[in-house]
Amino acid sequence: MIDEKIAQPQATSQESQAVEQPQAQEISTSGQLDTVEEANSIPQKFVGKSPMEIIQAYRELEKERGRLASELGSTRKERESLEEQYRNLERERIAQMQMPTQRPPRVVQMEEEMDPVSVFESKFEEDPKEAIKQALKGLNQSVSSKLKQQSIQQIQAEGAEYYWKQKKDNPDYSRREPLMQQLASELQDVVRPEFLNSAKVLKALDLMSRGMDVDYYSKQAVERVQKDGLSVRSEKQRAQSESAVSQGDTSVAFEKLSLDEMRRALGRSDD
């Protein structure tokens, strides 16, 4: 009986050890899983780093972020400055396109130049007289074309010089410029395109625009005088009306006066 009682507690102790061992394994396994999950949640570049190293890395990151923000602000300012410059240039380009001197002249077709020497060599054996004639013609065309081109360039250069001088020295010139542009468009049928921007034509446009300008301001002056005259007349009538009201209206119809009253009113006497 005693042996049986002693054997039973020993079996219970072994069973308890068998139950406790899996529990310890479960706790150990769950702890390892938590450690693995925590390690996976940390960025790879911070794995194995000390807290001070992580803090230093964060400070460097903040510093780099500030530098990038500063560069971004500077870049935005530069972009805004470039956009403003572009808008100014675009306004100048549009203004220049509207200027008389900046209107592109119609392309003038020139006759194809002939090389006098080539013409002479190719035609001399067949017809010497014709070869000489064609060579002289080609020479004249070449010289004439070059002189004409130089003349057109000089004419347009003189016109541009006159235009910019007027723009600089005469503030009223810019105000009358739309009138000159209107006149220039009306003269396109009677003035050759290459001469439309010459100094002579620009001077003529300037004088004509002054005439149109004077006419415009004369009309304004007349309208202003008429308006002021009506205002003065109405003011005078109002003053007379107020004076009559304040003094009382003592006028009597002429036909109601007696003969003596008429004589006194007219300042006449039969005596």
Image (cartoon, rainbow, N blue to C red):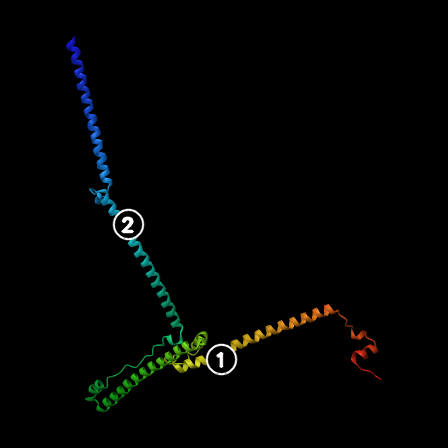
Residue under the image location 34 percent in, 63 percent down: 81
Q: Residue at the right extreme?
A: 271
Quarter holding residue 44: top left
Residue 176: % across, % down: 46, 75
Q: Which amino acid does label 2 sit on?
A: Glu
Query: Against 242, is 22 above or below?
Result: above
Classify 10 Å Cα crowding around label 2: few (below 14), some (14-19), many (20 and above).
Answer: few
Residue highlighted by disc 1:
211
Q: Helix or strand or loop: what does disc 1 sit on?
A: helix
Quadrant in which the C terminus is drawn = bottom right
Disc number for residue 62: 2
Please provide percent x and percent y for residue 217: 52, 76
User: Measuring 24% from the left and 44% from the top, which residue is drawn there?
Assistant: 54
**Could you give the CA–CA distance between mark 1 and mark 2, rounded to whole angstroms?**
71 Å
Q: Which of marks 1 and 2 is nearer the N terminus?
A: 2
The residue furthest bottom is 129
Say which residue appears at 22% left-offset and 29% top-offset: 27
Q: Tell me which residue sits at (22%, 36%) in the image.
A: 35
* Three-letter code, disc 1: Gly
Q: Using the rendered image of the protein, determine whether residue 38 is visible from the camera's viewpoint.
A: yes
